[in-house]
C-alpha cells in the first residue's frame, strides 16, 4: 500500500542526499519483499535469516556458515545485498517465483546507502511511544500553531507552499459538513459572513461542535469501525437490536466523554465495581460481532468464531493491528505470534451467554435480544422509565396471617388514565378512596385495571386488606398514570388488623424468585434493553487452536498482551478485561495514534497513515510522522479530549486552505497527502441523504431510539432472505421515521440500505476504519432517480414557487445558494435559466408528462404542473452537481 | 454525447499518471491497485467470460451425478466408521446413527462419452458430450453461510472480494455501457420454500477492492438496475436537457477547481444515461426467436425465473459482460428430497441445457465458460426416517459434484472419483481454490499473480492454502 509514499520519500532522500531513516525508507521495502520468508513467522523462515531485526541468532547481522546476512558497512560481504543484485535467476531476491515485485533502482539505491552507512536498525516506529519533536521551517509567516509548522516543514522539503485560505462560504460549508454532517443554512452563512471579528471562525467552530448533530455525525464513522448493524449477519440474518449502544456512542461524543474512558467502557464497562448503565451499555461493543442462529453450526465453532471476531474488532478499533492474521500461524510481518493472539483471545472467551442466538419462542426473539441484557432506565437514551415496586409486608418474616396496608398520595389533577397492577401471595382486596376496586386470590394473575375514575385531584387513599398462608408471601402494587406513579414500598403504612399503623417493610424488589416479573414495570411496547458483556464465574480455559481450527486444541494460554508490546499490569491474580482496557489506554503505543489518525482522516479524507486499520509493518508509514506524534501526545495530555482535538485541527491554517489547485497539482498529489491545498473528497452516503432531507426542511431532529426504515425499492430483502428470516420483507416506516438522520437507518447486514451501499457504505460485517470512495454510474442514477430524494426536490420546488414575489432569476439564485452555500455566477445563472426555460417549454408541450412528474413528486393536483415539474427538475439537476456531493 | 475533448475516465487518468509521472506521483487507492497487481491477462485466454450457475443450498451429488449402484444393497445399514473417520457433522445429525440411504433415482449412460446421469436431468443428459463433470469437489465448510462465502469469495470469513469483482478488477471492461459483473438471483424456485437459504450481498461484494467492481444485482421486478428509470414523467428528452446543463456546470467547476474527479463524475453521469437505454435493451426479450425461447423451456416466460435468467445471461455474454452469476436457491434437502429435488431440476435442467445449446449454436460456447456448482454436497446417510422413496440428506463437504462446459474445458469428461459411498474423494481431488484457479486460468489469469495488497498480505482469490490449476480438464 505504501509504494508511492516510499518512492516520494525516496526521491526526497536522493535529492537531498540526507541520512536514511530506517523506518521510513528501508523497513517498508524489507517488509513488502522480504519478511514473508525472512520475517517474524518462524515456520516459513528461510535460511535462518530474519530481516526484521538486526541481532540474535537469526537476525540480519548473523553469520551462518561463514556468511553474513548483512555486514554493516560492507556491501561485498553482505549476502543480502549480493542476492539482491545478482544476475542469476535462481539466486535473485525476492525469488522470481514468489511473484513479489523486483526491487527497482531507487529501492536498491536506498538499501545500498543504508548498508554502506552501517545498516542501522531502529525499533518499528509505531511500537515506540510517541514524543513531540519540533519541526523545522523557514517560512515563519504562515500558520497559527504547531500543526501548520509540521505541515509546512514537509511542504518546504518538497518545494511546495501552502494554498491560500478558502473563502468564508466554503469554510462554513466545510466546517458544517465535517462537524455535523449537514450543510449550513442561509441564515447561518449570513451570520458568519457578517461577523468580522477575529473570533468569528472559532465561534463558528464552537457553535457547531456544541450541536447534538455533532455526536450523530461522529458516530456514523464509529459504527463502521465497530461493524454496528441491526441483524445477526449469519444464516437467517435475524433482527438484533444493538441500538442502545449506538445511542450511547452519540451521547458520549456529544458529552465529550474522554476517549480513554470511551475505550474502557467498551472493552470492560461491565467490570467496573458498580457499573453505571452507560458502562454496561458500552460493553455491548463485545456483542456487535456476527452471530449465527442455533441448529446449524457446531456450537463450539460458533463460540470460536465469535471470540475471534471480538478480538479482531479490538485489534482494528483500538490496537491498529491486524492481530487476526495470527489466528492460524504467527503473523508474517508483525511480531505477533499465534500464542499472542490466543492470549488476547483468552480475555474474550469467557462470555456468560450463548454462542448462538436462541429460538423464536419468548419475547426476546422479536425484540432482537439475547441474554445477557439490561433494561434501560435512562430517558436520555430513549427508554421509557422502568419503575420497580417492592414486595411489602408488615414485618420482615411472613407468617400465616392477615395484614392491612395504607398509602396516601396527592395528585395535581384527576388523571385520564391510571393503570393499576397489583397482586398478593395469597389474597388481597384493594380500595381507592373508600371504593372497592380490586381483589384477587391468585398471585400469578395480577389485577390489571384502569382505575382513573376512582382517583381525584388532591389527596387520595389506597387501603389494602391482605392475607397470607405459609412462610412465603407479600403484597406488590404499581399504579401508573401519564405523569405520576405510586409503587408499594416502605413509604406505605402497615398494620395487623386492629393494631397500630407503622411503616411497611420492603421484603424484596420486584422480579425476584419465585414470583419473578409478575408486573409490567415498563409499558410493553416501549421497553428497550441493551445487550451487554458479562463474565462467567469460572474462567473458560483458552487454548491455542492449531491452524486456527476450533476443534484442534493446542496448549492452554493465559490472558496476556502481545509479548513485543509493553507488559500488562494486572490488578488481581488473573488478568481481567479491565486490565486489558487500562493497558490499551495507558501502555499500548498505538491506541491514541490510531484514534487521532482516524479523526484526521475524517477531516482530510486520508489519514496521516493512510492504512488507518493497520499500523503494522505492512501498513503505510505516516506522511507526517512528527505531526502524528505531536497530535498523539497532545491528545493524551488533554485527557483524551476529542472535541479539543477536533477543534485544534479545524482551527489550523492547513485545514482552512482552499481546495482549488491546478490540474498538474491534482495529478501530482491526487490524494492530497502533502496538504498543499484543502482536501476535496466525495461525501459519505449519510451526508448525501441527510442534506437532501435537511434542505427540504423535513429532516427530523429526533435523536436516539430503535432503527427506522425509510422507503427502499421493493424486493431487495426478499431476494436474499429465508422463509423464516425475521424480518423477512422490508416494510417501510411512515411519517417522521422516514425522515430521521441516516445514522438511525435500519442496517441489514445481508442487504444494507441501497442508498448507503451504492455510495460505498460497508456491509458492517467486518470492522472498517475507512470507507473507500468511488464514482460510479449507479451513484449517478441514485442521485438522479431515487424516488424519495425526488419527492424532497418537489417540496423545494413548491416552496420556491410559493414565494410569488420572486422572479425566476431570484429563485435560481436563492435555491443555488441554499443548496451549494455559494453565490451564483452570471455564467452559471445563465445556464440554469436556459435549462429552466427549456424544461418549461418541453413540459408545456407534454402536459401528460408534467402531470406524471408532479405525481412522482408526490403532488397529486396542482394548477401549475408545468412550473412545478420544471423547477423540480432544476433542483434535481443541481443535486447531481459534483460539488453537491463533494466536501470542498 | 462527448462534450469534452479531454474525456478521461479516472482509471485511464490514473494509468496515465502512474505511468507518465512514475515515481513522482502520489498515487490514489486505485492507482496503487494498478501498480500492485499485474493486471490484464498473463497468458492467452481460452475463455472471455464466465456464466456461473450457483446452486445455493447444496445439491445432492448422489441423486444427480455421482452414481453409486452398490448402495442399493446397503439401504438402512450403518455407514462404516472407517469411511466417515471422525468427520465433523452438523448439529442436525450430530449424535445420530448414520444409516445409508441409496438414491431412488435411476441413472443411465449418455452420449458418446457414456457419462452417467440421473433421470432427474433429462435435458442435461443430452448435453453430456459438451460437459465436464467433476465428481471430486471438496470444501472446508459444513454450513451454508461460510460455504457460500467460501465459494463466492475464496474465504469463509466475510470481507473478501467476490470472484466477479476480482475479474472486473483484473480484466478490462468489454462493454462501456454495461457493468462487467452482473448477478441474478432467481425470484422463485419449484422445490418448495422450506429449504431456502439466505443470500448476502457480500457474495457479489467487492470486499477490499474498489466498489466499482462489485456485482450489479439485477432485480427481478421493478427496475432491473436500482434507480435506473427516470421518475415517471421525466422523459429521456427532459433528462437529456438536464444532463446537458449539468455537464456545463460541472465542467465550469472543473475549470475553476481543477479536480479531475469532476470529469469522472461527468463521464459516469453520461454512462448512467447510456445505461438507461442499454439495460432495457438487454432485458427486452421481444426479439428472441420462438425457437430460442423454447430451448430454455416454458419457465422462460416468467420474470425472475432461472430459465429467463439463463437467457438473459446469454444476452449479457453477447454484450461483453465478463462475469454473470446466477443464484438458484432451494437445494437444502434435509427432508422430502425426492419430491423437492424434482422441482429444483425442473427449474434448472432444461434451462442450463438450453443455455449450453444456445451458446453453442451461436459459436459462443468455445469462449464462454459455463459452470454449475453449489457450496457443498449431501450425505450418503439419510436424515429423518429412512424410507426407500422419501428421505433427506445432510450437508456434506468432503465430496460433491460440479460441471463445466465450454471455455476451453475438455468436453465429455468425468473427472475425479469418490469412494463407494460418495463420502470421500479417492481420485483427483478438486478444492474450491483449485476450481477458482482453473476458472481464472481459462480467462488468461495466473491466480498467483492477480493479487492486491491488503492488511499486510498480497491477497488473492485462491487464498493462502496451496492450490493448483486442474490441467487434466483443460482441452
Image: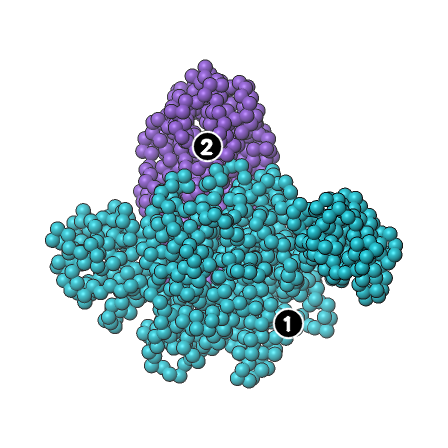
Chain colours: A cyan, B purple
- Residues at discs 2 and 1 both on one chain: no
Closer to the eye: label 2 or 1:
2
SS class, disc 1:
helix
| Residue found 60% across the figure and 33% down from its top | B193
Give the image location of residue A806, x and y in percent: 70, 73
Whether residue A785 is visible: no
Going by the image, does A64 lie left or right of A433? left
In the displayed structure, would residue B386 be above or below residue B211?
above
- Chain bearing tag 2 is B
- Report the front residue among A571 and A197: A571
Q: Which of B420 and B178 is in front in this view?
A: B420
Q: Is mark 2 on a helix, strand or loop?
A: loop
Measured as percent of width and height from the top left, residue A397 is found at: 70, 51
Q: Name the residue under label 2.
A: B89
Residue at 62% x, 71% y: name it. A185
Residue A814: give its label. 1
Location of residue B13 in the rendering, given as x and y in whole percent from the top left corner: 40, 59
Q: In this rendering, is residue A501 above or below B159?
A: below
- Is residue B155 something that shows in the picture? yes
Quadrant where the C terminus of chain B sits is top left
Q: Which residue is drawn at 36% across and 39% down?
A: B437
Which quarter of the figure has residue A551?
A: top left
Amino acid at each position: 500500500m505504501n509504494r508511492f509514499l516510499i518512492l516520494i520519500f525516496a526521491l526526497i532522500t536522493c535529492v537531498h542526499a540526507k541520512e536514511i531513516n530506517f523506518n521510513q525508507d528501508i523497513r517498508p521495502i524489507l517488509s513488502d519483499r522480504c519478511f514473508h520468508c525472512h520475517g517474524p513467522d518462524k515456520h516459513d523462515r528461510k535460511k535462518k535469516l530474519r530481516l526484521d531485526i538486526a541481532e540474535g541468532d537469526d537476525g540480519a547481522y548473523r553469520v551462518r556458515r561463514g556468511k553474513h546476512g548483512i555486514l554493516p558497512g560492507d556491501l561485498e560481504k553482505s549476502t543480502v545485498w549480493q542476492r539482491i543484485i545478482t544476475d542469476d535467476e535462481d539466486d535473485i531476491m525476492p525469488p522470481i517465483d514468489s511473484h513479489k515485485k523486483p526491487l527497482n533502482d531507487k529501492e536498491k539505491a536506498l538499501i545500498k546507502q543504508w548498508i554502506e552507512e552501517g545498516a542501522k536498525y531502529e525499533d518499528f516506529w509505531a511500537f515506540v511511544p510517541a514524543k513531540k519533536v519540533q519541526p523545522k521551517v523557514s517560512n515563519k509567516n504562515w500558520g497559527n500553531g504547531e500543526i501548520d509548522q509540521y505541515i509546512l516543514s514537509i511542504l518546504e522539503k518538497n518545494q511546495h507552499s501552502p494554498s491560500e485560505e478558502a473563502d468564508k462560504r466554503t469554510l462554513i460549508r466545510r466546517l458544517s459538513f465535517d462537524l455535523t454532517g449537514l450543510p449550513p443554512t442561509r441564515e447561518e452563512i449570513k451570520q458568519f459572513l457578517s461577523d468580522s471579528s477575529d473570533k468569528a471562525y472559532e465561534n463558528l467552530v464552537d457553535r457547531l461542535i456544541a450541536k447534538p448533530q455533532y455526536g450523530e455525525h461522529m458516530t456514523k464513522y464509529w459504527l463502521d469501525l465497530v461493524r454496528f448493524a441491526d441483524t445477526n449477519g449469519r444464516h437467517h440474518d435475524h433482527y438484533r437490536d444493538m441500538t442502545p449502544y449506538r445511542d450511547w456512542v452519540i451521547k458520549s461524543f456529544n458529552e465529550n466523554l474522554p476517549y480513554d474512558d470511551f475505550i474502557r467502557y467498551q472493552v470492560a464497562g461491565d467490570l467496573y465495581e458498580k457499573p453505571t448503565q452507560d458502562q454496561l451499555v458500552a460493553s455491548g461493543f463485545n456483542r456487535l460481532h456476527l452471530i449465527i442462529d442455533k441448529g446449524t453450526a457446531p456450537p463450539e465453532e460458533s463460540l470460536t468464531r465469535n471470540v475471534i471476531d471480538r478480538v479482531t474488532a479490538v485489534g482494528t478499533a483500538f490496537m491498529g493491528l491486524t492481530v487476526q492474521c495470527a489466528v492460524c500461524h504467527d503473523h508474517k510481518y508483525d511480531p505477533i505470534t499465534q500464542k499472542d493472539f490466543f492470549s488476547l483471545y483468552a480475555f474474550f472467551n469467557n462470555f456468560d451467554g450463548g454462542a448462538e442466538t436462541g429460538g423464536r419462542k419468548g419475547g426476546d426473539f422479536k425484540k432482537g435480544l439475547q441474554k445477557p441484557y439490561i433494561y434501560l432506565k435512562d430517558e436520555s437514551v430513549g427508554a421509557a422509565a422502568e419503575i420497580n415496586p417492592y414486595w411489602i409486608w408488615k414485618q420482615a418474616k411472613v407468617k400465616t396471617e392477615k395484614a392491612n396496608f395504607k398509602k396516601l398520595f396527592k395528585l395535581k389533577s384527576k388523571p385520564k388514565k391510571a393503570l393499576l397492577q397489583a397482586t398478593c401471595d395469597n389474597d388481597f382486596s384493594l380500595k381507592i378512596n373508600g371504593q372497592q376496586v380490586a381483589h384477587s386470590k391468585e398471585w400469578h394473575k395480577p389485577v390489571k385495571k384502569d382505575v382513573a375514575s376512582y382517583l381525584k385531584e388532591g389527596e387520595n387513599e389506597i387501603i389494602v386488606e391482605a392475607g397470607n398462608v405459609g412462610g412465603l408471601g407479600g403484597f406488590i402494587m404499581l399504579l401508573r398514570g401519564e405523569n405520576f406513579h405510586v409503587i408499594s414500598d416502605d413509604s406505605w403504612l402497615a398494620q395487623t388488623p386492629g393494631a397500630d399503623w407503622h411503616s411497611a417493610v420492603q421484603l424484596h424488589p420486584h422480579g425476584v424468585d419465585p414470583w419473578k416479573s409478575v408486573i409490567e414495570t415498563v409499558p410493553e411496547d416501549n421497553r428497550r434493553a441493551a445487550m451487554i458483556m458479562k463474565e462467567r464465574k469460572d474462567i473458560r480455559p483458552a487454548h491455542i487452536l492449531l491452524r486456527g481450527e476450533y476443534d484442534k486444541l493446542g496448549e492452554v494460554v493465559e490472558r496476556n498482551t502481545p509479548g513485543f508490546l509493553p507488559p500488562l499490569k494486572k490488578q488481581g491474580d488473573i488478568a481481567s478485561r479491565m486490565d486489558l482496557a487500562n493497558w490499551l489506554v495507558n501502555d499500548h503505543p498505538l491506541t491514541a495514534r490510531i484514534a487521532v489518525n482516524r479523526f484526521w482522516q475524517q477531516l482530510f479524507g486520508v489519514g496521516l497513515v493512510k492504512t488507518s486499520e493497520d499500523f503494522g509493518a505492512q501498513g503505510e508509514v505516516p506522511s507526517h510522522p512528527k505531526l502524528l506524534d505531536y497530535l498523539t501526545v497532545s491528545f493524551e495530555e488533554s485527557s483524551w479530549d476529542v472535541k479539543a482535538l477536533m477543534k485544534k485541527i479545524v482551527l489550523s491554517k492547513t485545514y482552512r486552505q482552499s481546495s482549488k489547485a491546478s490540474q498538474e497539482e491534482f495529478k501530482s498529489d491526487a490524494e492530497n497527502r502533502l496538504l498543499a491545498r484543502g482536501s476535496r473528497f466525495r461525501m459519505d452516503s449519510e451526508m448525501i441523504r441527510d442534506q437532501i432531507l435537511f434542505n427540504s426542511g423535513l429532516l427530523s431532529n429526533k435523536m436516539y431510539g430503535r432503527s427506522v426504515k425509510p422507503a427502499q425499492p421493493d424486493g431487495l430483502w426478499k431476494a436474499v432472505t429465508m422463509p423464516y428470516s425475521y424480518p423477512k420483507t422490508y416494510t417501510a416506516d411512515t411519517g417522521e421515521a422516514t425522515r430521521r438522520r441516516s445514522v438511525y437507518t435500519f442496517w441489514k447486514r445481508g442487504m444494507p440500505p441501497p442508498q448507503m451501499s451504492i455510495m460505498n457504505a460497508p456491509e458492517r460485517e467486518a470492522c472498517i476504519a475507512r470507507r473507500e470512495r468511488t464514482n460510479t454510474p449507479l451513484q449517478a442514477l441514485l442521485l438522479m432517480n431515487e424516488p424519495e430524494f425526488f419527492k424532497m426536490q418537489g417540496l423545494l420546488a413548491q416552496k420556491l414557487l410559493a414565494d410569488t414575489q420572486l422572479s425566476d432569476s431570484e429563485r435560481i439564485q436563492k435555491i443555488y445558494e441554499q443548496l451549494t452555500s455559494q453565490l451564483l455566477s452570471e455564467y452559471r445563472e445563465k445556464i440554469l435559466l436556459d435549462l429552466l426555460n427549456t424544461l418549461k417549454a418541453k413540459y408545456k408541450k407534454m402536459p401528460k408528462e408534467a402531470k406524471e412528474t408532479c405525481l412522482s413528486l408526490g403532488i397529486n393536483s396542482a394548477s401549475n404542473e408545468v412550473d412545478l415539474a420544471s423547477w423540480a427538475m432544476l433542483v434535481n439537476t443541481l443535486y447531481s452537481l459534483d460539488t453537491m456531493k463533494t466536501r470542498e | 454525447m462527448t462534450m469534452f475533448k479531454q474525456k478521461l475516465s479516472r482509471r485511464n487518468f490514473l494509468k496515465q499518471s502512474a505511468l507518465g509521472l512514475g515515481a513522482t506521483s502520489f498515487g490514489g487507492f486505485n492507482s496503487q491497485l494498478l501498480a500492485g497487481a499485474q493486471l490484464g491477462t498473463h497468458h492467452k485466454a481460452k475463455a472471455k467470460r464466465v456464466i456461473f450457475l450457483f446452486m445455493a443450498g447444496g445439491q445432492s451429488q448422489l441423486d444427480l451425478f455421482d452414481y453409486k449402484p452398490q448402495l442399493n444393497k446397503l439401504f438402512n445399514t450403518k455407514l462404516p466408521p472407517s469411511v466417515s473417520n471422525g468427520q465433523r457433522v452438523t448439529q442436525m445429525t450430530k449424535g445420530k446413527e448414520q444409516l445409508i440411504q441409496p438414491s431412488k433415482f435411476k441413472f443411465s449412460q449418455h452420449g458418446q462419452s457414456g457419462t452417467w446421469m440421473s433421470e432427474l436431468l433429462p435435458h442435461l443428459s443430452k448435453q453430456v458430450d459438451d460437459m465436464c463433470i467433476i465428481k471430486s469437489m471438496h470444501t472446508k465448510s459444513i454450513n451454508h453461510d461460510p460455504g457460500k462465502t467460501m465459494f463466492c469469495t475464496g474465504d469463509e470469513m466475510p470481507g473478501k472480494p467476490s470472484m466477479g469483482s476480482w475479474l472486473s478488477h483484473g480484466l478490462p471492461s468489454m462493454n462501456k455501457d454495461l457493468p462487467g459483473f452482473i448477478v441474478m438471483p432467481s425470484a422463485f424456485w419449484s422445490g418448495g420454500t422450506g429449504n431456502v437459504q439466505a443470500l448476502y450481498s457480500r457474495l457479489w461484494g467487492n470486499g477490499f477492492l474498489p466498489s466499482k467492481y462489485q456485482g450489479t444485482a439485477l432485480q427481478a421486478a421493478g427496475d432491473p438496475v436500482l434507480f435506473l428509470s427516470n421518475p415517471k414523467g421525466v422523459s429521456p428528452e427532459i433528462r437529456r436537457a438536464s444532463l446537458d446543463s449539468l455537464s456545463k456546470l460541472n465542467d465550469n467547476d472543473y475549470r475553476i477547481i481543477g479536480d479531475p474527479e469532476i470529469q469522472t463524475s461527468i463521464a459516469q453521469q453520461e454512462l448512467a444515461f447510456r445505461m438507461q437505454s442499454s439495460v432495457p435493451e438487454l432485458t427486452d426479450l421481444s426479439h428472441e426467436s420462438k425457437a430460442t425461447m423454447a430451448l430454455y423451456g416454458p419457465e422462460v416466460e416468467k420474470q425472475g425465473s432461472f430459465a429467463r435468467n439463463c437467457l438473459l445471461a446469454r444476452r449479457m455474454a453477447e454484450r461483453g459482460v465478463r462475469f454473470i452469476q446466477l443464484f438458484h436457491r432451494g437445494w437444502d434437502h434435509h427432508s422430502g428430497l425426492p419430491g423437492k429435488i424434482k422441482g429444483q431440476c425442473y427449474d434448472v435442467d432444461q434451462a442450463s441445457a438450453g443455455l449450453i445449446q444456445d451458446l453453442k449454436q451461436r459459436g459462443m460456447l468455445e469462449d464462454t465458460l459455463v459452470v454449475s456448482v453449489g457450496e457443498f454436497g449431501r450425505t450418503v446417510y439419510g436424515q429423518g426416517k429412512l424410507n426407500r422413496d422419501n428421505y433427506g440428506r445432510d450437508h456434506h463437504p468432503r465430496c460433491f459434484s460440479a460441471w463445466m462446459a465450454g471455455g476451453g474445458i475438455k468436453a465429455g469428461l468425468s473427472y475425479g472419483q469418490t469412494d463407494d459411498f460418495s463420502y470421500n474423494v479417492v481420485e483427483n481431488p478438486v478444492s474450491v481454490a483449485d476450481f477458482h484457479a482453473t476458472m481464472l486460468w481459462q480467462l488468461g489469469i495466473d491466480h498467483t499473480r492477480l493479487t492486491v495488497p491488503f492488511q499486510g498480505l498480497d491477497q488473492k482469490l485462491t487464498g493462502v492454502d496451496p492450490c493448483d490449476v486442474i490441467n487434466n480438464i483443460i482441452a
